[in-house]
Image (cartoon, rainbow, N blue to C red):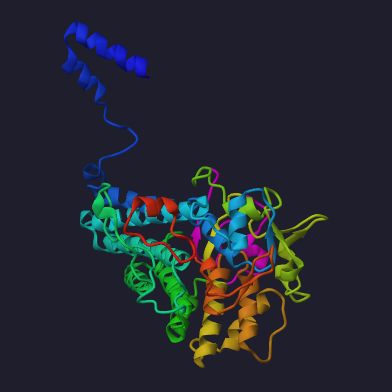
Amino acid sequence: MKKIVLGLLAACLVTGTVTSCNNKLNVEPVDAIDASNALNTAADVQGALVGSYTSLQADAGYNGYIQLMSDLLAENGEFTFVGTFTQPQEFQRKALRRDNSFVQQIWARGYTTVNRTNNVLANLDKVTVAATKARIEGEARFVRSLVYFDLVRLYGKAWNDGTPSVNPGVPLILTPTTAVSPANNVPRNSVAEVYAQVISDLTIAEAKLPASNGFFATKYSAAALLARVYLQQGRYAEAAAAANRVIANASFSLTPSYSDEFYQGVDLVPTTSEDIFTIQNTAQSGSNSGSNQLSVFYSGNQRGDISINDQLLNQFEADDDRKNLFTITANQVYSDKYDGQYGTVKLIRLAEMYLTRAEANFRAGTAVGATPLSDINTVRARVNLPALTSLTLPAILKERKLELAFEGFRLGDLKRNQESTIDPVTSTVIPWNSPRLVLPIPLAEINANPNLTQNPGYN
């Protein structure tokens, strides 16, 4: 390429047409659009919104890394990463390096998604139809809140660890970033500030989103995520109320069997009556040819880097239908929950809402929508387990753990319930509030932004 350019320049000098040749070299890029020309119409804004969903679909987004890496960090001997990659092993050992590529990718993808939603929100004035404008705003706020909630839980201390108004969370960026400048070097906002923004976005989203919206976010997606956030904060009355708003919508119902929700013997596992919000995959979409990375890591049909241990299997009751979603071989036990290579990733589903309402009501001493015992027995009945006649908090938490296994809940639940985990190699007990259970701010981000402070234990 260097010889071609030099040769062309020489030709221009010989013919005396330098200006003309320079114009030929000034070719407008065809793989990018200037920001001032990109979002001029309502259709442009809608297209940018679709791009926000596409960003969620990335490997480092909700197509696998957020769920898997957080579960590995919380893991206490119930499953083992048996793959050859060293960096997931760092998560399982709770011995992360600042330059761990998964740590960097999750952060970078998160802020890419945030920036896409910010571009949508900054251009809402291009949308003139009121209902469409409200829907687009609600969807963008839902996507942004989803990302910020997980970023602050991964890179900041837990809500119940110290003082949220003082503890550093992640930078809150609420306007589009269009150019790199010193103004981009923003500090970390507090954990409390990030949670407040998440709740604000979700409250607005629930009010503006429609009840039905295809496989995009709805008002019930926002209410369900609010229930998850409130539960993480220990705001039980609000968690129960938000979960109840979802359950009360008759359009959702548990699938007849547990396997119907996750595995139907085909690559493309469809959206079901239980799904409140999913990440859609096909063979033609996604950053990795639409491949569900949870399938890549968990399924025995693919790499199968996760081996399930007896410590987890022995917690299931004898007739629990959820035990049938494992494949046991001579060398390894695999979870069949993600056997569909292009299956939808079930990010929020109705069973979680029953479990959230049960736990929140139990802790608050209330019965919003139903009694905690009734909700737990609803979940148990679907997996062919007998109804309980009495209920304890440990029984609720056990049901939640087994129902939501491998779906990215363990780290958040471990921290809010103040449980411990272990280093699987040394058997060292690691408490819920250990700095080892908080991701480092990626080294590349620290190097690029002098206003970012590093988390304890990673300096």
Q: Does residue 259 belong to the magenta stretch?
A: yes
Q: Is the magenta stretch mostly helix, strand or loop?
A: loop
Where does the N terminus fall, quadrant-wise? top left
Using the rendered image of the protein, determine whether residue 57 is visible from the camera's viewpoint: no
Q: Can you say whether 355 is above or below 143 in the image?
A: below
Q: Nearer the viewer, residue 398 or 96?
A: 96
Residue at the top extreme? Answer: 14
64 or 208: which is nearer to us? 64
Quick check: 270 left or right of 140? Answer: right
Does residue 1 appear to the left or right of 426 in the view shown? left
User: Which residue is nearer to you in this view: 419 or 405?
Assistant: 419
Tell me if I can see residue 304 in this picture.
yes
Residue 10 shown left or right of residue 418 in the figure:
left
Whether residue 377 sits left or right of residue 168 in the image: it is right
> Where are the magenta residues, as a range?
254-283
Q: Where is residue 134? Give x, y as percent.
A: 29, 64
Q: Is residue 151 magenta?
A: no
For residue 47, above or below residue 137: above
Q: Where is residue 300 in the image (x, y as percent from the top left)?
A: 71, 52
In the rendered view, would you say 318 is above or below 68? below
Query: In the figure, residue 33 lies in which quadrant?
Result: top left
User: x, y (%) of residue 224?
Assistant: 46, 72
Q: Where is residue 80 in the image (x, y as percent from the top left)?
A: 69, 60
Quadrant of the snapshot with the C terminus: bottom left
